[in-house]
Image (spheres, rainbow, N blue to C red):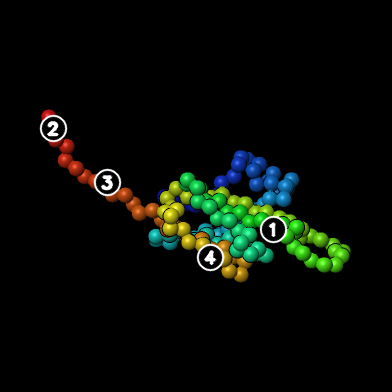
Amino acid sequence: MFSVLPYTDGFFGDLNTEFFGRTRGFKTDIREEDDKYILECEIPGFSKDEIKVEAVGGSLSLSAEKNSERENKSGKYLRRERTECSYNRVFDIPNVDADSIDANYSDGILTLTLPKKQAQIPESRRIQIK
C-alpha cells in the first residue's frame, strides 16, 4: 500500500522553522482515488506566480513566497503584519507518474492531481536450458 507522505528534515524540522523562522508549512488534504492522488493545499493570499511546484526524483516540493519589497504602496503604515512569509512542504511520491502531474490554483486552494504509476506486469520468457 502506498501513501503520499510529508517529509521533514528531522525530529524538530517543522517545529524549528515554524517557531524560529519565517518558513512554515500549509494545511494539505490528500485523497486517494483508484488511479490518482489529489492534494488540496491551502495557500491563501498568493498569486499563482508566487507558488512553485517541483517534482524531483521521488519527491514533490511545494513552496510559496511573498515579499513585501515587491509592493509599492503609498502612505504610512500604523501596523504591518503581512510583510513577508514563505511556505514549504515536501512529499514522498515514489508511486506517482511525475511527468503527468497537473496543478490548478483557485480561491487560495492549490489542487494537484498525481496520477499513479501503472503497475508493471513482469514479462514472462522461457529460459533455454543448456
- Work out which quarter of the rendered image holds the C terminus and state it: top left
Q: Which residue is mark 3?
A: 122
Q: Is residue 84 visible?
A: yes
- Secondary structure state at the residue bearing disc 1: strand
Ranked by sequence position, the earlier of labels 2 and 3 is 3
Q: Residues within 10 Å of mark 1 (few under 14, many from 20)?
A: some
16 relative position to 124: left or right: right
Nearest the eye: 98 or 114: 98
- Secondary structure state at the residue bearing disc 2: loop
Q: Nearer the viewer, mark 1 or mark 2?
A: 1
The kind of residue tagged 2 is Ile
Q: Residue at x 24, y 46 (%)?
A: 123
Q: CA distance from mark 1 to mark 4?
A: 19 Å
Q: Residue at x 42, y 50 (%)?
A: 95
Q: Residues within 10 Å of mark 4 (few under 14, many from 20)?
A: few
Q: Is residue 39 above or below residue 128?
A: below
Q: Which residue is mark 2?
A: 129
Number of marks in picture: 4
The kind of residue tagged 3 is Pro
Q: Is residue 73 above or below residue 99?
A: below
Q: Nearer the viewer, mark 2 or mark 4?
A: 4
25 relative position to 1: left or right: right
Position in image of residue 49 (x %, y %): 61, 61
